[in-house]
Amino acid sequence: MTLVSLSDVAVHFGGVPLFEHVSFTVQPGERWGVVGRNGSGKTTLMDLVRGVRRPDVGAVSRAGSMRIAVMTQDRDFDGVDTVWAAAARGFGELFALEASLEQQMAEMGVAGDAVSPAMLDRYAHDQERFEREGGYAAHARVDAVLSGLGFDPTAAHDQRIATLSGGERGRLALAEQLAAPADLLILDEPTNHLDLATASWLEGYLRDLNEAVLLISHDRAFLAAVADHMLHVEGGTAVPYTGGWAEFVHQRTERRMAQERAVRKQATKLAAEEDYIRRNKAGQNANQARGRSRRLARVERLSPPPGAEGVMAVVFEPSSRGGDQVLVTDRLTVAMEGRQLIAPWSGLLRRGEIVGLIGANGAGKTTFLKTVLGERPPSGGEVRLMPAVEVAHYRQDLGDVDPDATLYGLIADRRPMWTRGQVQGHLGRFGFSGDEVLRRAGTLSGGERARVALALMMLARANLLVFDEPTNHLDVESIEALEDALEAFDGTVLLVSHDRALLTALTTRIWALEDGRLVDFPGNYLEYAADKVDREGRRDALAREAMTPTGDPRTATKAAAAARRRLERSIGGLERRVTELEAVLAKSEARLADPALYAESDGAADAARLVADRDQTRAALQEAMAEWTAAASALESRL
C-alpha cells in the first residue's frame, strides 16, 4: 500500500515557481532523507504531504487511513500540564478507550449474572480495538521515548512543562511526535539541540521503527545512519534517489556529470546550426537556412545542473600568526548557580589544533566557552588567553547579529572605509544580493542569520575561531563550505558541535565533558567515540563482577540480555551500512580506473568530482567501521 504519492507537482508563489515536476512515492517502512538549500521548498513539500497545502499543478494522493505525526513548531502543549501527559498526547483516544474498558469492567462486575449480551459484545469489541491499536504497549512506548530523549519517565508524571528550558521543550515536542501512533513520521531537523548521545539513540530508534519516515536534516552522519531513500530539493525541482546518503552522493555526481555532457553536446549542435544559418542567410540555401532557423527557435534548451551558485564563499584568514600557545588553564573550575559543572582542570590549547568540545546538553559547554573567553569569571583556578590571540566567537543564539540593523549596516560598521561595492560584494559571498542587503536582520530566517554571523566572523581576521553549534541553521551545502574553510584555516579552532560528520572531518583533539569532568583526549572524534565505548564496556563488566550476593540475579540477567540485544541490533545496522558504503566505494574506484573516463574532453573535471566523492565515502566508511569495531568489542566483553 502506497502511503503518499506526488505526481508532477508544482507550487507557485506570486506566479513564480518554487518547484515543478516533482514526483515520488513513499511506501510503508521507508526512511526518506530530505535535503536541499534553505529556502528551496523542503517545508512546503512536507505541507503537501500532510495535506495542509494543495499543489498549484499536479496531484497528491494519500492513503485514506494514514496517520501522520508531525512535531509542532509552537510547542505550546495546550491542554496538558505535565511532561508525561504531553509526550502521551498522541494516545489520547486510546487512553480514553482504556478508561472506558475499566468502567465497563466495573459495570459488569456490579451486574454479575445479569450482564447482557450487548455489554459483553461492546466490551469484546472495544478490547479488540484497544489491542489492535497498540494500547497494551502505549505506556511502555511513551516511557521508552522519554528515557531516550533524556527525561526520567517516572518523574515525568509530575514534572511541570512550565519548568522546562527551551531546549527541553524542543526535546519534549520530539518525544510527543516519536511516541504517537502513526504510519508516517515527518521530522524537521530533529537533531538540532540534541547532544551526541541522544542523537545516537534517535538513530537506533528510527532504524527499528516499522513506520515510514520523512526526515528533513542537514546532519550528514545522521542521514547516513538512518535514511534508505533520499530526496534532493534543488534547481526548482526535487529528485528522488534510492539508497542512503553515500549512494545519493555518488548518484548525484554521476547525474550532474551526465547533465553537463548533455548540455555541452546540445550547445555544440546548436552552435553548428547557428553557424550554418549565418552563412546561408542569402543564396541558394536561404530557404533551408530559414527552415533550420524556425526549428532552432522551437528547440528547448537544456539547463546546466545546479552547481555552486548560491553557496556561501567563506574564507577565514588570520591577520597575525600568534604564538604556539593559545589558551592555558590551571585547575580551572566552572560552576553556575552553586552547581559545579567542571571539576578543576588544567589544559593547553596549541596553535593549529581543531579541538571539538562535546558533552551532554546542560553539561556546561557554553558556560565553559564564556569562562575561557573572559566573559564570566572562573569559579576557581586560572585561565589565560595568550597576548597575541585574536578571537572571533560564533554564538549559538546568533547574538552578534543585531536584529534592528540592516545587513549593509552590519558590514559597513565593521568596515567604514569600504565602498558600497565592497560591502555588497562581501554580502554577495554569503548569498545576499540586490535589495536584500537593505533587509533588517530581524526579518531573516535562522539560516540567513547564521550566514550573516559567519560573514561578520570572516571580517574579524582572528587567529582563534570559537564556534558554538554553527551547523544548527545551515543547510548541507553551507555546512560543507564551512568545513572546507575551517580545514584550510591557518589558525586554531575550538568547536562545540553535535554534527558528527563535521567533528569527524576536522577535529585533531577532543575535550569531552563527562560527569562533571573535562576529559582531554589526544585524537580525533572517531578515536574518542571508540575509546568511550570501550571504557563503558569495561565499566559495565566491573559493575557486573561487583554485584553483591543480595542483588537479584534475574534482574542483572535481564539487563545484560537487553544490553546484548541493543548491541546486536546496532551491529546489524552498522554491518548493512558498511556493505552499502563498500559497494559505493567500489563503483567510484571502478569508474576512476576506467581509461575511457580520461579520454573524454571533460574527463579531468569528472575525475576530480569522483575523487572528492570517493574520499567522502571513504571517510564515512572509516566512521562506520570504527563504530562497528567499538560495538563488536563491547558485545564481546559481555559474552
Image (spheres, helix red, strand yellow):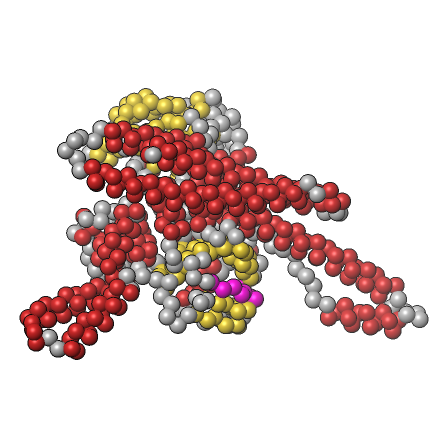
560 or 226: nearer the viewer? 560
Q: Does residue 283 belong to the magenta stretch? A: no
Q: Position of residue 494 (x, y in %)?
A: 42, 33
Q: Position of residue 614 (x, y in %)?
A: 59, 41
Looking at the rendered image, the quarter that the C terminus falls into is top left
Q: Is residue 567 above or below residue 329?
A: below
Q: Position of residue 373 (x, y in %)?
A: 36, 31
Q: Position of residue 354 (x, y in %)?
A: 46, 31
- Can you tell which quarter of the image residue 306 is in? bottom right
Q: Is residue 483 above or below residue 542?
A: below
Looking at the rendered image, the quarter that the N terminus falls into is bottom left
Residue found 63% across the figure and 54% down from its top: 255
Residue found 52% across the figure and 52% down from its top: 243
Q: Is residue 424 above or below residue 7?
A: above
Q: Does residue 23 belong to the magenta stretch? A: yes
- Can you tell which quarter of the image residue 278 is in? bottom right
Residue found 66% across the figure and 59% down from its top: 303
Residue found 37% across the figure and 70% down from its top: 65
Q: Main secondary structure of the magenta part?
A: strand
Q: Is residue 390 above or below residue 4?
A: above
Image: magenta residue range: 19-26
| Residue, far right | 284
213 or 417: nearer the viewer? 213
126 or 350: nearer the viewer? 126
Q: Is residue 14 left or right of residue 519?
A: right
Q: Is residue 438 left or right of residue 372?
A: right
| Residue, far front | 113
Residue 603 visible from this viewpoint? no
Residue 259 visible from this viewpoint? yes
